[in-house]
Image (tube, rainbow, N blue to C red):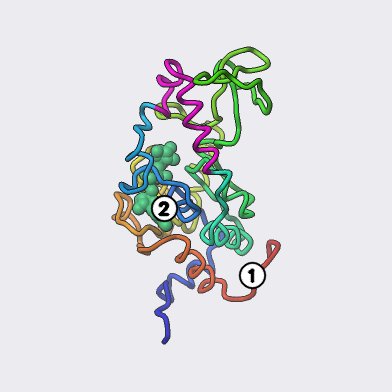
């Protein structure tokens, strides 16, 4: 049985010639690693918690202990998770493309674990801890009483994960790099994101405005589907390895060509 090639020949050739490729990823690429997405009704965190109550500066101010407990639970999920074939395929793609930039909304660090080097974490990283008063980076702290958040050993303010909470600004330098990469790329893969959270969701439109080919990889249609040139409907863990095999069919590399 011959399997239908994933990409039309002209798209395959375009990606083979592309000098600058950007991948924009969301929670969907980590779903197959067992980390719940935010909005998938049956498993998403939205269904079980209201992240607006938990992942917001207001919640941090009024109930830091609850926010700390929720993120400790999520850190536990991340520690149990491993990169899946979708993450690994993007690390392989980076080794094949002259200039590859991975922009992620995810905070789980799985892209770096998979071997991706040039990763822009728009929303921070859940495994890093800082204090609320001065963002002191903290790696060790005294355990807190039940229901309370631990304190910064430097200034005594409460600790929080180094992630962007709803309503907070993205790290400026990281977002500037993401804008530049999106503005100048030949192709952008938009993978596993519902495309409803800005400013990340504006990046595919910016790429398209500047002449990039936009490919969406998602089992479901999203508000970004309309501006994609190609929509590949299915799980990233299957589609990305197939795409890499079709576009770069020779042996996997261990270092940049
Ligand atoms: N492969 C690819 N995509 C998938 C898969 C999969 N195996 N499983 C689910 N998806 C898709 C869903 O169809 C959905 O479109 O992943 C998307 C997940 O969307 P969200 O849960 O909204 O995650 P994301 O887009 O990353 O959310 C953006 O919002 O909650 C904030 O800061 C948080 O970074 C997050 C941001």
Q: Tell me: residue 109, above or below residue 68.
A: below
Q: Which comes before the other along the chain, label 2 or label 1? A: 2
- Magenta stretch? 54-77
Q: Report the residue marked by disc 2.
A: 192
Quadrant of the image for the N terminus? bottom left
The label shown at residue 201 is: none
Q: Position of residue 2 (x, y in %)?
A: 42, 85
Q: Nearer the viewer, residue 93 or 179?
A: 93
Q: Nearer the viewer, residue 159 or 223?
A: 159
Which residue is outermost to the bottom? 1
Q: Secondary structure at mark 1?
A: loop
* Magenta portion: prevailing SS class: helix
Q: Report the residue marked by disc 1.
A: 252
Ligand 1 within 8 Å of disc 2? The answer is: yes
Q: Residue at x 34, y 44 (%)?
A: 39
Q: Residue at x 42, y 15 (%)?
A: 62
Residue 109 painted magenta: no
């Amino acid at each position: 049985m011959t399997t239908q090639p994933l990409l039309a020949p002209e798209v395959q050739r375009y990606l083979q010639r592309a000098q600058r490729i950007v991948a924009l990823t969301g929670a969907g690429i980590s779903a197959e690693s067992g980390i719940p997405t935010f909005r998938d009704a049956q498993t998403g965190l939205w269904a079980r918690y209201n992240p607006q109550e938990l992942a917001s500066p207001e919640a941090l101010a009024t109930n830091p202990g609850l926010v700390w407990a929720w993120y400790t639970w999520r850190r536990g999920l991340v520690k149990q998770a491993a990169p899946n074939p979708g993450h690994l395929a993007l690390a392989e793609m980076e080794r094949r493309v002259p200039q590859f930039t991975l922009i992620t909304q995810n905070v789980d660090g799985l892209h770096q674990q998979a071997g991706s080097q040039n990763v822009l974490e728009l929303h921070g990283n859940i495994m890093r801890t800082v204090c609320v008063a001065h963002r002191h980076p903290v790696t060790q702290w005294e355990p807190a009483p039940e229901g309370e958040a631990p304190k910064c050993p430097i200034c005594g303010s409460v600790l929080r994960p180094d992630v962007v909470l709803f309503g907070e600004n993205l790290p400026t330098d990281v977002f500037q790099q993401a804008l530049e990469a999106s503005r100048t790329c030949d192709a952008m893969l938009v993978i596993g994101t519902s495309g409803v959270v800005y400013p990340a969701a504006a990046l595919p439109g910016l790429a398209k405005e500047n002449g990039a080919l936009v490919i969406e990889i998602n089992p479901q249609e999203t508000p970004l589907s309309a501006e994609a040139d190609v929509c590949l409907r299915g799980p990233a863990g299957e589609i990305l390895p197939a795409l890499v095999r079709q576009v770069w069919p020779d042996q996997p590399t261990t270092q940049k060509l």
